[in-house]
Amino acid sequence: MENGIKESQASLNRNGAHTVLSTAAVSSEGNKNGKGVVNSLMSGALAGAVAKTAVAPLDRTKIIFQVSSNRFSAKEAYKLIYRTYLNEGFLSLWRGNSATMVRVIPYAAIQFCAHEQYKKLLGSYYGFRGATLTPIPRLLAGSLAGTTAAMLTYPLDLVRARMAVTPKEMYSSIIQVFIRMSKEEGLKTLYRGFTPTILGVIPYAGISFFTYETLKHLHAEHSGRTQPYPFERLLFGACAGLLGQSASYPLDVVRRRMQTAGVTGHTYGSILGTMREVVAEEGLIRGLYKGLSMNWVKGPVAVGISFTTFDLTQILLKKLQQMSNVQSQQDAAHMVARKNAKFRFI
């Protein structure tokens, strides 16, 4: 500005005319978006932590079966959990959960936050609001969110898998896993299994978010309520987890085999090579779908808790912010009233 005071910003409307936006309005919108991002990050982090901790023993058991040639069954899974409890103690069922938290908290925070931002981005591109995206953009938003989170946090997922399948004497801490893997197997090992991870995340995250958002949308249309009850959110999330994990499960097995190759004695070099070896040794269903029945228990529970925790935390944070804004406005009004009273007195 010529007078050196920035009082407004100009933009073009659809008719080509200049629309003047006050700096205060632009700043307010920026603050609102910034708070929305922070809320999404916090809600996503809590959602991931709560969900993964709840199913950690089942998750660890599933990984152990995925990376071994032992036949999976509910009975064998129960025996493994019980033996682990007897030999190593109750808390050993959560072995590797610290590494899981180190990965899941940033992963879930990034994924949920990215999903909200991708919904806004695709909504503006296609001319829809995020909540009413058509099916294809809705599916795309979920896939992009999962891909973004996986790319940024993958080495932590690999470390968690290593800690889950090895005795505690082998790796005493997360840092030691990184150091030993880097020295003994090379830095490239930190991204071993990355390709099947991304290929699995695309359908998993896409279908999960798509299913959950679609069920909420259909629920709002048929019930007339904009917000589902918590148990309904859990049910929608369970359906989302069931469909998403079933669609991507073979790639999850391949990913685990490649991640833990250094400690299981195998030398898996590629996705197709790993698949062929697993199928040759154990068969198609018993190999590539080993542990899926456990995932049908664990997955829906974890995803249901995750989505529900995220939504309810978002709602809570928004209410707290609204209360804070109201309080700030009241304090400002009281301050102005006191100043006016003081001037009248003078």
Image (cartoon, rainbow, N blue to C red):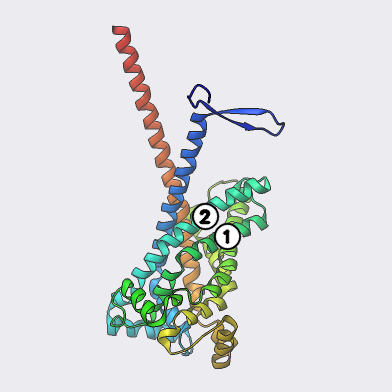
Q: Is residue 153 above or below residue 334?
A: below
Label annotation for residue 134: none
Q: In this view, does 313 lie above or below 297?
A: above
Q: Residue at x 48, y 24 (%)?
A: 4
Q: Determine which residue is flagged by label 1.
A: 144
Q: What element carries label 1?
A: helix
Tell me which label, 2 or 1, sits earlier in the chain: 2
Q: What element carries label 2?
A: helix
The reply, left or right, for residue 229 in relation to residue 45 is right
C-alpha distance separating marks 2 and 1: 8 Å
x then y, percent, for residue 146: 53, 62
The reply, left or right, for residue 163 in relation to residue 274 is left
Q: What residue type is labelled 2?
A: Ala
Label annotation for residue 114: 2
Residue found at the very far right of the displayed protein: 15
Label 2 close to label 1 by CB (< 8 Å): yes
Relative depth, front residue between 178 and 63 = 178
Q: What residue type is labelled 1?
A: Leu
Q: Residue at x 50, y 67 (%)?
A: 300
x then y, percent, for residue 175: 32, 71
Relative depth, front residue between 23 and 217 = 23
x then y, percent, for residue 127: 67, 45
Residue found at the very far front of the displayed protein: 2
Q: Is residue 2 above or below residue 132?
A: above
Asked if residue 4 shows in the view, the reply is yes
Asked if residue 231 shows in the view, the reply is no
Q: In which quarter of the image is residue 169?
A: bottom left
The local crowd at label 2, few if under 14, some if 14 to 19, many if 20 or more residues have their Cα within 10 Å, is many
